[in-house]
Amino acid sequence: MSETILETKGLTKYFSNKAALENFDLQIPRGCICGFVGRNGAGKTTAIKLMLGLLKPTAGSSEMLGCDSMSLTPKIRQRIGYVTEGHRLFRRMTIAGLESFQKPFYDNQWDYKFFAEMIDYFELSKKQKIKHLSNGQRAQVSLALALAPHPELLIMDDPTMGLDPAIRRQFLQGMIRLIMQQGRTVLFSSHILSDVERVSNQIVVIDKGRLRAHCSIERFRESIKKVKLSFAKTVPAHIDIEGLLNCRIADNELELILVGTPQEKITRWAASAGAENYEIVPMNLEDQFIEFTEPKKRGKLFQWENN
Amino acid sequence: MRFLALFKKELREAVPWLILATLLLLAISWFMIHMKAYDQSRWHYNAISNGKVIDTYMIFRTDIMLESAVLMFFTSIGLGLSVGIRHFWVPDFTRTWQFLIHRSATRSLILSAKLTAAATVLLCLSIAWLLLAGYAHISERVIVPPESGIVGLGIFYAYLGFIVYLGTALCALTTARWYTTRMFGLFFVFIMFMIILSPTNFTFVFFLTVFFLAVLIIQIYETFLQKEF
Amino acid sequence: MALWIQITTGSTDPVYAQLINQISRAIAQGLLKTGDKLPAVRKLASELVINPNTVAKAYTHLEQAKLVVTKTGSGTYVADIKIRSADAAEINVLTERMDNIIARAINLGLNRNNLANIFKSRLEKFSDKNHKSGEENE
């Protein structure tokens, strides 16, 4: 089994002169749960569709399970599960009908017992038609259909959008259960950062069509810091600390958002800038994400609205 | 196995339209045949009972199934159009494209399943037409049974219906804007109709349709295999 | 046994830190005694709905801090407290943290007596049974 399950090189996609994705270089190792995060329109769905061969790249390449995305063979596709938000399935079919439609595409991989157990657990009946199911129930069916063949690589594009917390939890449980089987990998995009933090070991941040970060979730959490400094008189006009992301001033207080700045450098800068004291304020993942993807106004100081 | 699963799914989607078309065709044609047969026998009877010299040609100049053939023409085209829209166009159904394309099957297999299902549906319609013709043959009310030419024509119309399906499919798949070449598929089919409906040799007409069919199929495959979803 | 671990997402503490803190605290409070077996990585991951890797990392971290010991093929167990002893560096970190807490308390208006009482009552929550050796060390 190869170590890299997914690899993109310079993957670029333009939609009539507008770059949806640019120079996207990513390697996902086998066995991890990788969370794709980014603002709306950042390019997550574009990246995923390019990887699955649903879109043609303008430049660059992408490989899944060692096969080029533009020519994924049926044998490779059957090892990949794909779930999208909205969970659009054939509305006129029953759940049983969908199962018998799906089975032939997986040769001997289909786990009848597992599928039946999941449907049972969701309190659904196989005789129900898809069009009579609620959004949440359809998502549950979609999850069962994706997990029943125990795919080697499961790709989920915002699968829990608009779903209640209980169903979101079921998706996370499904992911954890899959990852515990040997050699499985999960890639999922989500806006719900608490879900991403919960189950991912790696995080990929896509911002305005570009890869901004790809590291372990712990490293991401440790790297982005909020530092509050207070000054006796005025805040220095020029802030030149390494790793500066954002800064805000209010009266004599300065709030800095830093990326990857080592502790000693913070202390040294605080001293050299003449700060009275400084404090590292803990942030949660959501705050870190928002700061990391805020529009950049590097070097300029901007004011809070003080009332 | 994969092809069968795809084929069954596509067929199931098209079947409601087939049922509608078949019922329409059979019910209305049956009615039309009976009306015509009654009319013909009434003329015949009146003429004989009045002792007039009748012009047989006048009474039976048109085939018993002529009007049904006209209905078959429009039904086939309607069926081809409907199934084409159902398979390729309606957003509510085409939102499942991503699900379908990601199945472990080549794109050409997926497309072939759709086309085969549509062909099957139109084949079923021609079977319905044949049953109708069979009925017109054995029915005692019908004085002059239908000619084989008309019966063959009905089947030819079913085949034209399939070409309309292909034209619809091409229009749905192409990425061109509606005000440029989007409607090329159906326009192409329209041209075909213009040519074949003008009085010409049937052999020429048949080979022409084969040409149009081939062009459409090639275009559809090329477009589908390259299409982005 | 895993029921007393609560993972709060959206918290300023990363998931692995919460795990480490809660297990450490349980050991310190005597809820987990020497030789007690920690839940298997997979079981805990499955129950808490977190990545098994995160659990593994937390266990490794605890092992490096000499709070637990992993026996291959068997599982992870709470380490023998007698083996542990705080070194000078660790005590420094602890002292610094205490200073921060004291500073904050004073800024909140608490006087030294209040603070001492609060500290004492919190201390009572932690069992002394495991810490005879600690007292011996100092």
Image (cartoon, coloured by chain):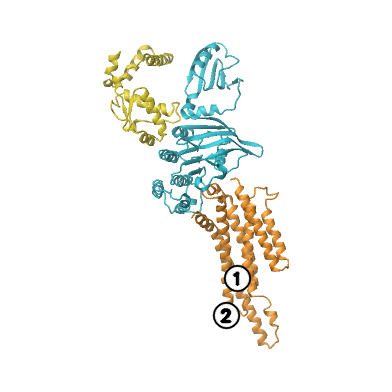
Q: Residue B161: which disc?
A: none
Q: Could you tell me if residue A162 is visible in this image?
A: no
Query: Which label's residue is closer to the chain start, 1 or 2?
Result: 1
What residue sits right under mark 2 in the picture?
Answer: B140
Quadrant placement of the C terminus of chain C: top left
Give the answer, above or below, for where B41 lies relative to A80. Answer: below
Q: Residue at x 54, y 11 (%)?
A: A272
Q: Residue furthest front?
A: A1
Give the side of residue A74 with respect to residue C72, left or right: right
Kind of residue indicated by mark 2: Glu
**Residue at image point 43% right, 26% down:** C13
Q: Colour of chain C?
A: yellow
Disc 1 crowd rating (10 Å Cα; few below 14, some 14-19, many 20+) is: many
State the hue of chain B: orange
The subunit carrying tag 1 is B
Q: Amino acid at mark 1?
A: Ser
Residue assigned mark 1 = B29
Secondary structure of the residue carrying numbered label 2: loop
